Image: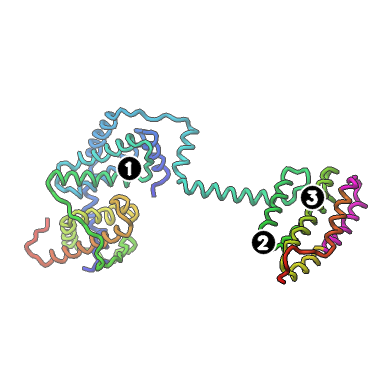
Amino acid sequence: MPDLHEQQQVYQFSNLHSREAFDGLYQRYIVAIQKYVHYRIPGSENVDDLTAEVFGKAWEYAVKNPKVEIRNFRALLYKIARNEIANFYQAQGRIPMLVELDDPEEDTEVPDARTDSLQKLLNKQDQTRLIKTVQKLPEPYKEIVALRFFEELEIAEIAEIIGKTMGNTRVLIHRSVKALQKIYDREGTDPTIEIS
Amino acid sequence: MTEKELIRQLKLVKTAYYDKLAPDAETVDKIHQIVMARVGQCGTAPVVVSKLSFFVGFLRYLVPPQLAYGVALLALVISSAVTATISQRALPGDSLYSAKLALEKTHARFVSNPASRAKVQMEFAGRRLEEAATAPTAMGAKEALQNFSQEVKSAKATLKEAADPLQVEEATYELAKKARQYKEKLQETQVRSTREVDVATLHDAEQALQEAQEPSVTDGDGGL
């Protein structure tokens, strides 16, 4: 939930087109958005330009839609970022993986990781292996891992960002973890996989 | 590795990997310049409003419409309850006196059983008599007495709508008992009072009380 100061900034930006307020919001979210974009398109030279595009489009969205009241600026930024990344992949000829959510065999119980306290520390090798595994995840799951476990967003906000119901979002989170687990365990048994 | 363990370990990956993707200060500035240049190109001037307009607008923005309606409804309920409480003490001539009478009428309407409603109306008649005794002006006392007569007659008329003979019998007894009490009180009030209340009003009140002591003839068939 944004604090009162942020709500004031969002109101001033979206309703009064205040550049000062927009600047404040930029400073608040530039690191998070740039990290997210960098994570989604690693090694690309377009990360900075794409990040600038996200904020530029956020401004234009407010200006061109004066009757739309923006309540969650962070969610708006992530939505725009997702669209820009999807356009980037399309331009590169990469077809995104479709995720079906109607599989009844899936166990939809999702443990809330952030309420668990850390009991064990990984050694460095395991950590590196897990980073590699995360990088190998298919795009929809890679995105979910970033939003849920790295950006630590609430499920409701993630649902708003990705345009799905809370139930579907929970299923996606669960499947992301399952996919991660599968790849992680598979990589552990394959001696030919290089860990960078 | 179990699923739970995997999720826990992702927290370490966040620190070891994800957080390290953060831009440096130079990159933040560079992107800032690109963004603000684009904002400038849009050519949109900021909207200038007064402090009051800003305050009202921001308040409306903070409070979603559904919450605003809920708060307004709650305020209405609370103010109604406060008005009802204050009006209880209102006397003829006070600004809230008519509100008091209206509330009592509404109360009576919610009593569906005619026999019970008649008893309620007789109770309200008693209040009118109290008001007549304590009203600050002769006009107020007269108004209260007129209302008293009206309430007594209404109680009698309501009782005629009752169908259950047992309920009618019981209510008739209650009304007659109250009527006797009120008659005594009316006489006491006349003796004590130094204000003049016109004879017609007094006669009307006494007449109403006399009729209230008579047995009731119902409109209903009494279940026969």
Q: Chain of mark 3?
A: B
Q: For residue A193, which quarter of the picture?
A: bottom left
Q: How many marks?
A: 3
- In the displayed structure image, the side of residue A43 where residue B98 appears, left or right: right
What colour-coding does the image apply? rainbow
Q: Which SS class for mark 2? A: loop
Q: Main secondary structure of the magenta part?
A: helix
**Horizontal and vertical percent position of residue B197:** 88, 46
Q: Which SS class for mark 1? A: helix
Crowding at label 3, few (<14), some or many (≥20) Cα neighbours within 10 Å?
A: many
What residue is pinned by disc 1? A28
What residue is pinned by disc 2? B112
Cα–Cα span, label 3 and label 1: 70 Å
Q: Chain of mark 1?
A: A
Start and end of the magenta stretch? B176-200
Pair 2/1: label in front: 2
**Residue at (29% x, 51% y) in the render:** A163
Q: Chain of mark 2?
A: B
Marks 3 & 2, CB-CB < 8 Å contact: no
Pair 3/1: label in front: 3
